[in-house]
Amino acid sequence: MIKKVLLGALALLITLAVLGRVLLPGLLENAMNVVDEHAPYAVSAEAQRLHDALFIVDLHSDSLLWDRDLGEQSSRGQVDLPRLRQGNVAIQVFSATTKSPSGQNYDSNEAGTDTITPLAIVSGWPSSTWGSLFARAQYQLDKLLELVDDNQPQLIFIRRKADLEALLAARQSDRAVVGAMYLIEGAHPLEGDVDKLDTLQAQGLQFVGLTHFFDNELGGSLHGISGEGLTAFGRSVVERADQLNMTIDIAHASPQMVRDVLALTSRPVILSHGGFKGHCDSARNLDDELMLQVADAGGIIGVGYWDATACDYSPAGIAKSIRYGIELMGLEHIALGSDYDGAVTTSLDTSELAALTQAMLDEDFTEAEIRAVMGGNMLRFLREQLPD
């Protein structure tokens, strides 16, 4: 009798584990990557024609974090390859999130907790990733490279200028071809070893975020405790990134870290996803004075699509945020940085980006302004900054 009870309990545990593995990742993503319910956006024929002729670049999506095939269209989340094509996105930068504190907020976070570990376990990531942030970064890069392999020649991984030019040539005859690039959201996956940056760069990493929601070995986060700038290790990472022709991403960096980076690096930086404090007074956004310093150094800001960056995150609200950035920093410094699939609520997914083109036309943007913001500025940046 006891044996039967134990076997029954074991069978129940196995069943619950299987159901958890199958159902829980999807339930978590549905709760965290939300698109507000809305009627279809009205897009004029003029706006659609312009949108279809754009070269669109999005600087930040966390889609690699989730347990679904990005090659297939999904009802979950905000980005997959079919929806990128529907939105006419030419390049998507995919970010690797490797650690995130529990109770995550924009004001103050300790570094001691981590919500990515249980997500990795329930999503079936290799056991090597459960205790190693470096292994998590490599695993997400492997997922991206596998996605590229499975979808060639219509998905091109961009590491060098030649890859970018190949994408441009391919899109002349087939607008369904998409480029993919890789970013780490915070350099804590280096685990205090700058040589690991070389390893990731050799595998395809181009954009190096320094911090995320907590202070790390490189210095202070915008949402951490210390507010400090670059540590000695942080300086060594920035210097090595310069040597490797990589681009620093200052998203989530403390103001002092941003100043330190601008004083140290010889290359322009990006802020892959964020907003302007003068437009939307949120703890997520950097103040206008610091944004002007980024512009003076040739940097580019990816304007976010969610409430903490734009306040009003409707297409019209995002367009107003973009207009503020142009008037503050100059047209050449503004791009798109959705933060899709980054546990944010948005008003549209990537398939609906024509609604943003319409909103910009409604706000009296010129065609030249729309072309620059939607991707022209980043195309110029990549042509200048990618390694040969």
Image (cartoon, rainbow, N blue to C red):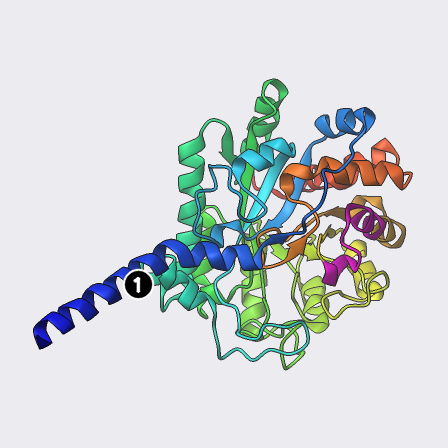
Which residue is situated farthest in the top direction here? 173
Q: Residue at x 56, y 33 (%)?
A: 178
**Is residue 218 located in the magenta-colored stretch of the structure?**
no
Q: Is residue 371 left or right of residue 342?
A: right
Of 306 and 89, which appears nearest the observer? 306
Which residue is situated farthest in the front direction here? 1
Residue 202 vs 343, above or below: the answer is above
Residue 365 shows in this picture: no
Measured from the top left, where is residue 268 in percent x and y? 70, 52
Measured from the top left, where is residue 306 in percent x and y? 71, 56
**Is residue 310 located in the magenta-colored stretch of the structure?**
yes
Measured from the top left, where is residue 357 in percent x and y? 78, 36
Q: Read off the magenta span.
A: 307-322
Residue type of the residue flagged with mark 1: Leu
Q: Residue at x 74, y 71 (%)?
A: 283
Measured from the top left, where is residue 65 in percent x and y? 48, 55
Of 46 and 229, which appears nearest the observer? 46
**Quadrant of image for the C terminus:** top right
**Quadrant of image for the N terminus:** bottom left
Residue 85 shows in this picture: yes
Of 1 and 60, which appears nearest the observer? 1
Q: Residue at x 65, y 65 (%)?
A: 252
Q: Is residue 308 left or right of residue 202?
A: right
Q: Residue at x 10, y 77 (%)?
A: 2
Of 308 and 135, which appears nearest the observer? 308
* The quadrant where residue 292 appears: bottom right
Q: Is residue 81 left or right of residue 374?
A: left
Name the element at disc 1.
Answer: helix
The residue labelled by disc 1 is 16
Chief secondary structure of the magenta span? helix
